[in-house]
Image (spheres, grey):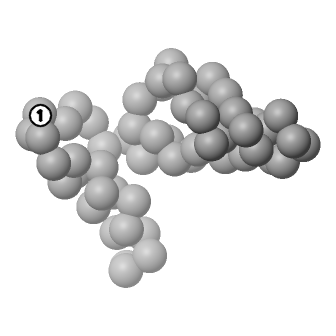
Amino acid sequence: MAQRYASERGAQTISICNTRGASIVREADGVLYTRAGLEVSVASTKAFVSQILPHIC
């Protein structure tokens, strides 16, 4: 909802997502895919690490 709200008011939006075809990807003007692979646990540890690792290394 927040992304749609911003887009409706003229903002450019970008999403960070692990899954192609997710609703946030369809709504965004740009997308950064983490390509973290399938997440099996409740806590999305793999997706989180794939987002922060490039900033640490």
Quadrant of the drawing holding the N terminus? top right
Give the structural element (helix, strand or loop) at label 1: loop
Q: Inspect the image, locate mark 1, and give the three-letter code of the amino acid beneath it.
A: Val
* 31 is higher (above) or lower (below) than 25: below
* 24 is higher (above) or lower (below) than 51: above
Residue 34 placed where, x, y %? 42, 46
Q: 32 left or right of 10?
A: left
Residue 28 can be seen in this image: no
Q: 33 left or right of 6?
A: left
Residue 46 placed where, x, y %? 22, 51
Residue 4 position by quadrant: top right
Residue at horizontal 11 percent and vertical 34 percent from the top: 40
Residue 23 placed where, x, y %? 53, 23
Packing grade of label 1 (10 A; few <14, some 14-19, many >=20) is few
Name the residue at the left extreme.
41
Q: Nearer the viewer, residue 55 or 14?
A: 14
Quadrant of the drawing holding the C terminus? bottom left
Residue 12 placed where, x, y %? 81, 46
Residue at horizontal 27 percent and vertical 36 percent from the top: 37
Q: 25 left or right of 17?
A: right
Residue at horizontal 19 percent and vertical 36 percent from the top: 39
Q: Badge 1 is on which residue?
A: 40
